[in-house]
Amino acid sequence: MATMADVARSAGVSIATVSHVLNGTRPVLPHTRQAVLDAVEKLGYTPNTLARSLVTARTRSIGLAVSTISNPYFTEILQGVEAAALERGYSLLIADPHDDPAHERKVVQLLHERRVEGMIVAPSPEPGDLLAYLRRHQVPTVFLDRLVGPPAGDEPPLFDQVCAESTEPTAGLVTHLAGLGHRRIGLVAGLPGLSTTAERITGYRHGLAAAGLPFDERILVHGDSEAAGGERATAELLRLGSRPTALITANNAMTIGALRALHTHGLSVPGDIALCCFDDFAWADLFSPRLTAVSQPSRDIGARAVRMLLDRLADPDRPTRTERLPCTFVHRTSCGCREERNPS
């Protein structure tokens, strides 16, 4: 295996010059730089990243802690994070906190001990220990998808964070269904304690108010952001004496669970009950009927998180910020419309 000394001999320069070219630590004349790069290519030299990190105290790695990586939404976020990180010369170390506060604190500490330069985290519903650890050790961090509010409402966030809009898109699903004549519109909400859950419930209630419909707490149930929970919660709604005529599921995992429950009860969509979901996914267009959904810019969220983290690493004293990306209404047929049409 070629060494840095081999590259230096081939290029006719010092080892220090090779180091400056590869690490960008000092300007080098263009023809010298090119000679070094030609020698690297000719010899197939691969830098020793571990050794370099011991010298520079930089690992060029990012820790990513995201629960339910098997969820297609988070899988797409992961793809966005990975592509943006690799484009900028960073590698990823990935852990799944399982939405468990104690486990979350443990995996974040393990990532930190691997000397990642910063963290991207989708926090659990109870992130107190996580926040304490990150603040105590001053770990550059970006929260994605799930927001963590400041101690007081008018203060900036504790950490940089990026997510999709949730409130207005959910309200839009309610008003769309109300416009089709539905008066009992149920919601299968996510895991209590998550900002996404709270915001989608708020959007649901705003949509009901805008449509002149009363809020009925009996038809708002929690599916805990997972398929099994979505199935259980939907079955609970179907046992009501006056069940909903339309249903909104607040993430794609719960949509799968809801569809299972409806199938088990012998109900068709949209003939017996209309369905809209928050989160689009690759095969939503293949269901029969095709699923009307709110599509989140998941890859963009992942890429934006990387850019925010690198901005933080470059300027540790910059003000923290929250960025929200717009969603897209994807109109199909599970809502009961006969044909696709553009949202008004």
Image (tube, rainbow, N blue to C red):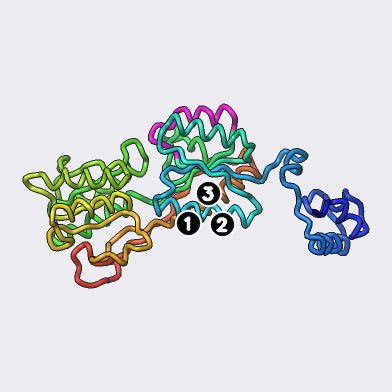
Tell me where residue 138 sits by quadrant.
Answer: top right
Q: Say whether marks 1 and 3 touch (CB < 8 Å).
A: no
Residue type beneath disc 2: Ala
Front disc: 3 or 2: 2
Depicted 195 relative to depicted 340: above or below:
above
Q: Residues within 10 Å of mark 3 (few under 14, many from 20)?
A: many
Q: Is-magenta flag for residue 131? A: yes
In the displayed structure, does residue 88 sit left or right of residue 11?
A: left
Outermost residue to the front: 1
Upstream in sequence: badge 1 or badge 3 = 1
Rendering coords of residue 249 (x, y %): 26, 51
Q: At 35% across and 50% down in the image, what residue appears?
A: 166
Q: Which residue has dot 2 on it?
A: 83
Does dot 1 land on a helix, a strand or a loop? helix
Upstream in sequence: badge 3 or badge 2 = 2
Separation of disc 2 and disc 1 at Cα?
9 Å
Q: Say whether marks 2 and 1 touch (CB < 8 Å).
A: yes
Rendering coords of residue 128 (x, y %): 44, 28
Residue type beneath disc 3: Ala
Q: Which residue has dot 1 on it?
A: 299
Depicted 47 relative to depicted 36: above or below:
above
Depicted 231 relative to depicted 288: above or below:
above
Outermost residue to the left: 241
Does dot 3 land on a helix, a strand or a loop? helix
Tell me where residue 278 sits by quadrant.
Answer: bottom left
In the displayed structure, does residue 57 sit left or right of residue 271?
A: right
Q: Which residues are magenta?
A: 123-138
Q: Which residue has dot 3 on it?
A: 305
